[in-house]
Image: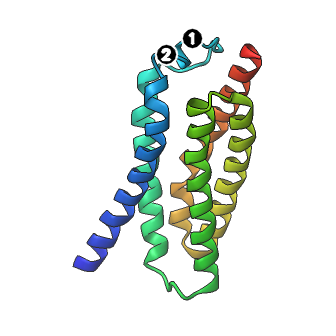
Amino acid sequence: MKKNILKLLSSILFCQLVGFIGSMFTAPYIKGWYAGLLKPSFNPPNWIFAPVWTALFFLMGISLYLILKKNLKDREVKKGLLVFLIQLILNVRWSFLFFYLQNPLSAFWNILLLWIAIALTIIQFYKIDKRAAYLLLPYLIWVTFASFLNFSIWQLNS
């Protein structure tokens, strides 16, 4: 029981750390560069992003935990963990491209890859533990919205 709680907490903290790394590329540019961009009417207020992403990374952590509880030598589990890691890397990379490099076009292509990686993670996790897959659905929905937002910002500012 204690081992499982430690694994759960570690999974959540790991995902939150990834979110924190992404925020390091984001936060310095919110009040300056990002504030100066033209944005579509459906752009949410800035304060909404931090709690949404915190919740999504929390759900990712629980999802990861459910997969880590399985046999780590299993081929499907290994594949699931690999695509999960890839989507985390693409997530951080989006923040780097969009905010740090201030390149909405490159970020848009990245977010499309991120969407595919999340979908593949959900498909792979579904084979292992359906609950882990379902926990990632809000993430996919949010990234779908974020993709439209990213595209709109690129269009309005190019």
Quadrant location of the N terminus? bottom left
Residue 82 picture quarter: bottom right
Q: Which residue is mark 1?
A: 36
Q: Give the residue type that dot 1 points to.
A: Gly
Q: Does the residue at mark 1 contact the one at mark 2 (Cβ under 8 Å)?
A: yes
Query: From what the image shows, is residue 26 above or below residue 117?
Result: above
The mark tally for this picture is 2
Above or below 122: residue 143:
above
Residue at (44, 50) in percent of width and height:
57
Residue on which the image places disc 2: 32
Q: Quadrant of residue 42?
A: top right
Disc 2 marks which amino acid? Gly
Write down the quadrant of residue 73 in the picture.
Answer: bottom right
Query: Which residue sits at x=33%, y=72%?
Result: 7
Which of these two is toward me, 130 or 56? 56
Would residue 1 be visible to someone looking at this image?
Answer: no
* Mark 1 nearby-residue class (10 Å; few <14, some 14–19, many ≥20): few
Q: Residue at x 48, y 81 (%)?
A: 70
Residue under the image location 57 percent in, 71 percent down: 81
* Residue 158 percent across, percent down from the top left: 77, 17
Image spot of residue 87 (x, y percent): 61, 56
Q: In this rendering, is residue 100 above or below 21?
A: above
The answer to whether residue 4 is left or right of residue 118 is left
**Helix or strand or loop: what does disc 1 sit on?**
helix
- Tell me the CA gap for discs 1 and 2: 6 Å
The vertical placement of 10 against 92, above or below, is below
| Residue 40 x, y percent position in the rendering | 66, 14
Farthest residue, direction front: 101
Secondary structure under the numbered disc 2 in the rendered image? loop
